[in-house]
Image: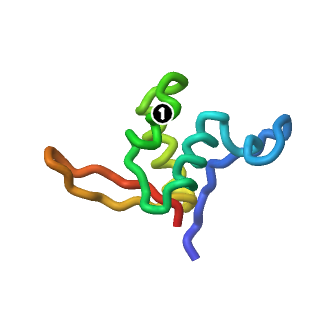
Amino acid sequence: MPDITHTLKMDLQNNDLLMFFKPWQLECMKTLWNNSDGLSSREVWEPIKDDIGRASVINFLEAMTLEGLLDKHEITGKARARMVYHID
C-alpha cells in the first residue's frame, strides 16, 4: 500500500466542514458537488472571484486531487487543453 501524506488539517474552532476548509474552499467544493459533469478551474472560481484569486483556486483543486477528494481529466479546447475537476 502506498504511503500517502495528507495535508488536510482540522480547525477545532469551527463546526461542520469549516473544520477542514476555509470558507472560499468550501464554496469551491459546493460548486463541484452541484455539478456532476465536472468544471474547469475558471468555472469553480467564478462564484468567488471577488474573494480570492484564481491561482489560489487552482492550487486548492490540485491539492484536493492529490488528497483523493477530486478527480480530474484533460479536455482540449479551441486554443489549448484544460483540466476539468469533478468529485469521484
Looking at the image, residue 20 sits to the left or right of residue 46; the answer is right
Measured along the vertical axis of the image, is residue 45 above or below residue 39?
A: above
Which residue extends farthest bottom? 1
Looking at the image, residue 37 sits to the left or right of residue 24; the answer is left
Residue at x 48%, y 33% (from the top left corner): 56
Across and down, in percent, residue 27 comes to 60, 40
Residue at x 54%, y 24% (from the top left corner): 51
Across and down, in percent, residue 45 comes to 46, 36
Looking at the image, residue 46 sits to the left or right of residue 73; the answer is right
Measured along the vertical axis of the image, is residue 55 above or below residue 35?
A: above
Residue at x 14%, y 48% (from the top left corner): 78
Amino acid beneath label 1: Ser
Across and down, in percent, residue 19 comes to 77, 43
Q: Which residue is mark 1?
A: 56
Q: Secondary structure at mark 1?
A: helix
Across and down, in percent, residue 53 comes to 45, 27
